[in-house]
Amino acid sequence: MLALSPDVVVIATGGLPQNPPLDAGAELVTSSWDIVAGAVKPAETVLLYDHNGGHQGMTAAEIASDAGAGVELVSPERFFTPEVGGMNHVPYMRAFHEKGVRITINTRLVAVRRDGNQLVATLGSDFATDRRDERRVGQVVVERCRSTIHI
């Protein structure tokens, strides 16, 4: 590589989990990576915020629902799983319908706070900035990664 005498060498090594910008409570969320790896067990009720719309969030939601958790998958996207192709969409949706996974689109995770043994997730909308909804759950799981590039 150096024999080519490049001006710049870019090494893209993948991504790392990263929380979305939250008003409060970033320390209270769990990464989808921890759920998928089995490092953290799903709680009885899980709100999974999927910022990426890809397989990672779907896999974490499927693992949580297979473990018996009540799962709500929340996405800021205008439609569900924009990064998952049609052929893969079908088995995810079949599993989600069988397990009762609730899907909410056009919604962002704004903040998380503790309330006793539960977490309260505050959800907002890009379309109605004054609208806020809350979900009381045992665990908030976030799927969002930051690309790692070295120059």
Image (spheres, rainbow, N blue to C red):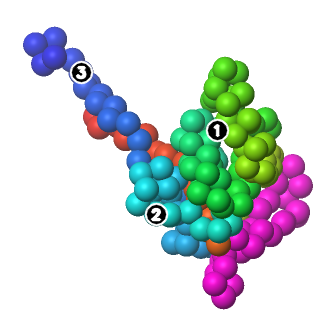
Query: Distance of mark 2 from mark 1, alpha carbons?
Result: 21 Å
The reply, left or right, for residue 43 in relation to residue 78 is left
The reply, left or right, for residue 149 in relation to residue 68 is left
Rendered location of residue 4, percent (x, y): 16, 11
Residue holding disc 2? 40
Asked if residue 9 can be seen in this view, the reply is yes
Q: Residue at x 88, y 63 (%)?
A: 131
Rendered location of residue 139, percent (x, y): 61, 68
Q: Is residue 143 magenta?
A: no
Q: Residue 38 lies in what quarter of the image? A: bottom left
Q: Residues within 10 Å of mark 2 (few under 14, many from 20)?
A: few
Vertical arrangement, residue 104 with respect to residue 136, above or below: above
Q: Quadrant of the C terminus?
A: top left
Query: Distance of mark 2 from mark 3, alpha carbons?
Result: 43 Å
**What secondary structure is marked by label 2?**
loop
The tag earlier along the polypeptide, 1 or 3, is 3
**Front-most of 49 and 147?**
49
Q: Which residues are magenta?
A: 111-137
Rendered location of residue 48, percent (x, y): 65, 55
**What secondary structure is marked by label 3?**
loop
- The amino acid type of the residue labelled 1 equals Gly
Vertical arrangement, residue 76 with respect to residue 81, above or below: below
Residue holding disc 3? 7
Check contact, mark 1 vs mark 3: CB within 8 A: no
